[in-house]
Image (tube, grey):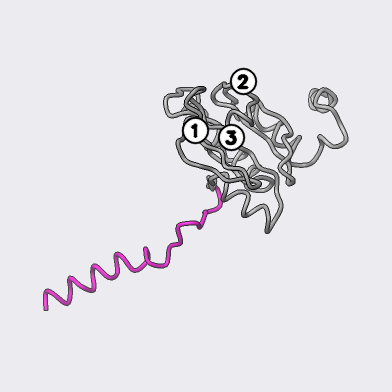
Amino acid sequence: MKSKTLQILLLSLFLPLLSFKADEVKEGDLKWLSFEEAVRLNEKAPKKILIDVYTDWCGWCKKMDKATYTNPEIIKSINKDFYLVKLNAESKDKIVFKDKTFQFNAEYKSHELALGLLRGQMSYPSTVFMDEGYNLLTVVPGYLTPENMQPILNYFGADVYKSKSWEEYQKELRK
């Protein structure tokens, strides 16, 4: 009898876990993707791509993860308009994109994709914005507070960049 009760208890505890899907994201959460996952998703449902280029040793990267990427408004904007990629600039993993394999470059102590995206200006964290066609829109080096990041997300997410310069957009925001 105790064995049956224990089985029922264990089943009731673990049954909800069986229905959970690893790729489900609750509202209010960010879904971090690999670069290749973002490309696959973009092929099916085009969105801009935001790439957080970081290193494991970067203190400002960790601060940005805790302060900026947990902000509810930032999360809402990113989930609406972007696929979000976390790219370790020192990763040893191979990444295949457009029939080219990118890998760690020992000479530069950096991943080739990070080197290309940051145009050799290796600064961490750096936030890379790409359009739906994988064109580089801009790279924003350094730590971004939620207050600094939100206008940038709006500028690219709402396609304002197609009709106004960043300077014009900033002037409008100050009014």
Say which residue label 2 marks.
121
Image coordinates of residue 159 in percent, x first then y, are 80, 40
Three-letter code, disc 3: Leu
Residue 38 or 16: which is nearer the viewer? Answer: 38
Residue 40 or 144: which is nearer the viewer? Answer: 40
Residue at 62% across, 54% down: 40
User: What secondary structure prevails in the magenta region?
Assistant: helix
Quarter of the view holding residue 153: top right
Image coordinates of residue 126 in percent, x first then y, are 59, 27
**SS for callout 2:** loop
Dot label at residue 13: none
Say which residue label 1 marks.
104
Three-letter code, disc 2: Gln
Residue 134 or 92: which is nearer the viewer? Answer: 92
Callout in the foreground (2, 1): 1
Circle 3 packing at 10 Å, graded few (<14), some (14-19), many (20+), is: many
Residue at 66% across, 45% down: 82
Image coordinates of residue 109 in percent, x first then y, are 48, 24
Which residues, given as a range, are shown in magenta? 1-28
Horizontal side, residue 170 vs residue 110: left or right: right
Query: Looking at the figure, which quarter contains the C terminus?
Result: top right
- CB atoms at circles 3 and 2 under 8 Å apart? no
